[in-house]
Amino acid sequence: MKWQEVQQIFPNQFVKFEILHFEETENKEIIDDVAVIGPVSDEEATRELLNSRDKILVYHTSKDQVIVKVRKNVGLRRNL
């Protein structure tokens, strides 16, 4: 389902979904195709996002696009 369709079905609320397709540019993923799991209440949105794994996200439908910033593996530093 396209993000615009999700916005029409679930206006102005958080939605939990699985990422089906995205476009990668520089350090961002622009998600354009999702499988909706369901709406999430405002009170539960943060907890649901923190418990999300793999390709599952929680995002608010007031946003025009779903954009995720990608952080590269930085590695660990340690002093000997």
Image (cartoon, rainbow, N blue to C red):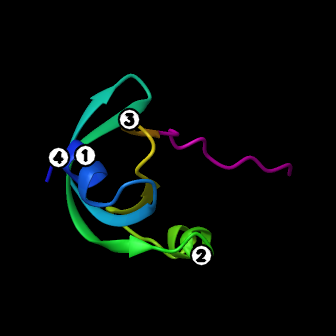
Secondary structure type for disc 3: loop
Cα–Cα span, label 4 and label 1: 4 Å
Secondary structure type for disc 4: loop
Q: Going from the N terminus, do you reach mark 3 or mark 2 first? A: 2
Most distant residue in the right direction: 80
Most distant residue in the top direction: 26
* Type of amino acid at the residue the image marks with label 2: Arg
Q: Residues within 10 Å of mark 3 (few under 14, many from 20)?
A: few
**Residue depth check, mark 4 versus mark 2: number of the one nearer the observer:** 4
The magenta segment is 70-80
Tag 4 and tag 2, C-beta contact below 8 Å: no
- In the picture, measured across the screen, residue 17 lies left or right of residue 12, that is left
Residue 37 vertical placement versus 22 (above, below): below
Q: Which residue is mark 4?
A: 2
Secondary structure type for disc 2: helix
**Residue depth check, mark 3 versus mark 2: number of the one nearer the observer:** 3
Q: Going from the N terminus, do you reach mark 3 or mark 4 first? A: 4
Q: Nearer the viewer, residue 19 or 70?
A: 19
| Residue 12, image quadrant | bottom left
Cα–Cα span, label 3 and label 1: 8 Å
Q: Going from the N terminus, do you reach mark 3 or mark 1 first? A: 1
* Residue at the image position 23 percent from the left and 42 percent from the top: 4
Q: Which residue is mark 1?
A: 3
Q: Which residue is mark 2?
A: 47
Tag 3 and tag 4, C-beta contact below 8 Å: no
Q: Position of residue 44 (x, y in %)?
A: 57, 77
Q: Nearer the viewer, residue 27 or 58?
A: 58
Cα–Cα span, label 2 and label 1: 22 Å
Q: Which residue is mark 3?
A: 64
Q: Nearer the viewer, residue 51 or 41?
A: 41
